Image (cartoon, rainbow, N blue to C red):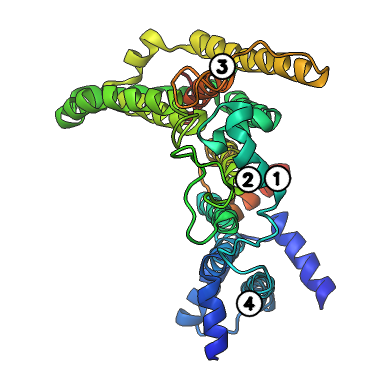
């Protein structure tokens, strides 16, 4: 039984039979009108579909059951004696302010104690936008004539139907969004926020601007070249500034980066610089996702 | 029964997270539309974030942003799961964007995003 099911599943994955739904619908159709006996193959496929659905539900229910059973044996929700709240968390909170200078303990943790991890995250975003560009960039090697015609048609429709409400509201709201994004980035070490959240807010503002005023306006100040320059410079700046503190830290040297007074905007050593770098990378990446997925170019 | 309900209420966030995970997983298995599969994947991601955030919470404590120079660890919740959730969100966004780009390529080639239709068309093409 299991082997049969597996081989059928493989057949289905390889698309060896007709689309299941089509088959399904056709056999129902036949039953209704002709009242003839369905083909044995159709019966088999129908049975397979039912089996697939039933087994999927069973697997999911079993999984949820096992997970819930495990969850009920975890330490009590909200209890201070939770094993996760051990001396590591205590150290981050109690020594964090003195060692990193960041009022926001999470920012101090991810951009100082665990800055290498955050560098990896920024690189993950960078690699994601790289792969999206590889897949979707429209250059002379990747152009379909029909698409171009369709795109031109869409642009014409866009030009003919100017959305005045969207434009006016975007005119008022986009500067505020960008300013708020910068505020979140620059206050990452003082309040909730940081490079990732502020960067995505700025990216959202850019996307709104592009959607309301057209991509040509964005292209005036943000094209492929600026995109490349900003992302690579920000990542390099992150890597170099963090390499300095890793080098001094690993060799027991004195770090010459002042921590400043906690709570001031120019404090917390490298965290502000790293936040700005991450914010640039994230904003460019968010806008890049939108631009490449919607148009295939920046 | 009463005891069981009390357990569920005590672990409400974890329970909700696991049920959300199940909803996402079953949609991942049953939906034929690739876009819906990606959305189901995102629901699963969100459930993991909810679970992690719930693990870091400690009753009656405040967010780990130091106020009034109070440096005792008993005032604030655990900051580590918050940092882990941040990592998770970034990876989830990247993976979603990559999925969407792949789906767009598939759509350009086959003019459909139904999984079984794409499979059939690909099979026909291979013959």
**The residue marked by circle 2 belongs to what chain?**
B
Which residue position is annotated with label 3? A231
Q: Secondary structure at mark 1?
A: helix
Q: Badges 4 and 2: C-beta atoms under 8 Å apart?
A: no
Task: Please determine whether, in this image, residue B38 is positioned above or below residue A27.
Answer: above
Report the mark closest to the observer, 1 or 3.
1
Co-location on one chain, circles 4 and 3: yes
Helix or strand or loop: what does disc 3 sit on?
A: helix
Q: Position of residue B8 (x, y in %)?
A: 54, 77
Q: CA distance from mark 4 to mark 3?
A: 48 Å
**Secondary structure beneath label 2:** helix
Identity of the residue drawn at 34% across and 14% down: A216
Local crowd size for mark 2, using a 10 Å CA cut-off: few (<14), some (14–19), many (≥20): many
Compared to residue B36, the image places residue A269 above or below, namely above
Q: Position of residue B24 (x, y in %)?
A: 56, 61
Respond whether the residues carrying marks 4 and 1 are from the same subunit.
yes
Answer yes or no: are tags 1 and 3 on the same subunit: yes
Q: Are marks 3 and 2 in contact (CB under 8 Å)?
A: no
Do tag 4 and tag 3 residues touch (Cβ < 8 Å)?
no
Q: Which mark is residue B85?
A: none
Q: Which residue is mark 1?
A: A88
- In the image, residue A267 sits, relative to residue A195, either above or below, namely above
Question: Is the residue marked by circle 4 packed among few (<14), some (14-19), or many (20+) residues within 10 Å?
Answer: few
Frontmost of labels 4 and 2 is 2
Work out whether residue A141 or residue A254 is closer to the camera in this orientation and state it.
A254
For marks 1 and 3 on the same chain, the one whose residue lies earlier in the sequence: 1
Q: Chain of mark 4?
A: A
The residue pinned by badge 2 equals: B80
Q: Nearer the viewer, mark 3 or mark 2?
A: 2
Q: Which residue is mark 4?
A: A54
Label 2 with label 1: CB-CB less than 8 Å: yes
The front one of A248 and B121 is A248
């Amino acid at each position: 039984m299991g082997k049969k099911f597996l081989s059928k599943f493989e057949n289905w994955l390889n698309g060896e039979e007709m689309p299941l739904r089509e088959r399904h619908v056709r056999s129902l159709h036949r039953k209704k009108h002709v009242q003839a006996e369905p083909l044995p193959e159709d019966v088999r496929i129908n049975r397979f579909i039912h089996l697939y659905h039933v087994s999927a539900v069973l697997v999911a229910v079993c999984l949820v059951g096992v997970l819930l059973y495990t969850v009920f044996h975890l330490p009590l929700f909200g209890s201070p004696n939770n094993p996760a709240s051990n001396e590591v968390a205590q150290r981050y909170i109690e020594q964090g302010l003195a060692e990193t200078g960041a009022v926001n303990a999470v920012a101090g943790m991810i951009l100082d104690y665990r800055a290498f991890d955050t560098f990896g995250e920024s690189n993950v975003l960078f690699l994601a936008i790289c792969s999206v560009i590889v897949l979707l960039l429209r250059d002379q090697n990747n152009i379909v004539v029909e698409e171009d015609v369709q795109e031109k048609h869409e642009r014409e429709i866009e030009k003919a139907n100017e959305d005045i409400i969207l434009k006016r509201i975007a005119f008022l709201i986009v500067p505020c969004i960008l300013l708020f994004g910068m505020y979140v980035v620059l206050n990452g070490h003082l309040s909730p926020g940081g490079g990732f959240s502020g960067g995505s807010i700025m990216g959202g503002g850019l996307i709104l601007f592009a959607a309301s005023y057209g991509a040509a306006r964005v292209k005036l100040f943000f094209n492929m070249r600026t995109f490349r320059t900003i992302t690579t410079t920000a990542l390099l700046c992150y890597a170099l500034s963090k390499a300095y503190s890793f080098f001094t830290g690993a060799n027991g040297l004195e770090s010459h980066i002042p921590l400043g007074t906690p709570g001031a905007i120019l404090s917390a050593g490298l965290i502000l610089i790293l936040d700005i770098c991450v914010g640039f990378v994230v904003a460019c990446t968010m806008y890049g996702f939108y631009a490449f997925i919607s148009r295939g170019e920046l | 029964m009463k005891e069981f309900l009390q357990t569920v209420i005590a672990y409400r966030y974890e329970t909700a997270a696991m049920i959300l995970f199940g909803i996402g997983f079953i949609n991942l298995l049953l939906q034929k539309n690739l876009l819906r599969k990606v959305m189901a994947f995102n629901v699963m991601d969100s459930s993991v974030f909810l679970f992690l955030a719930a693990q870091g919470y400690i009753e009656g404590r405040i967010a780990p942003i130091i106020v009034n120079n109070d440096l005792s660890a008993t005032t604030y919740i655990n900051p580590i799961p918050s940092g882990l959730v941040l990592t998770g969100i970034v990876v989830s966004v990247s993976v979603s964007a990559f999925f969407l780009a792949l789906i767009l390529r598939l759509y350009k080639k086959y003019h459909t995003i139904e999984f079984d239709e794409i499979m059939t068309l690909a099979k026909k093409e291979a013959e």
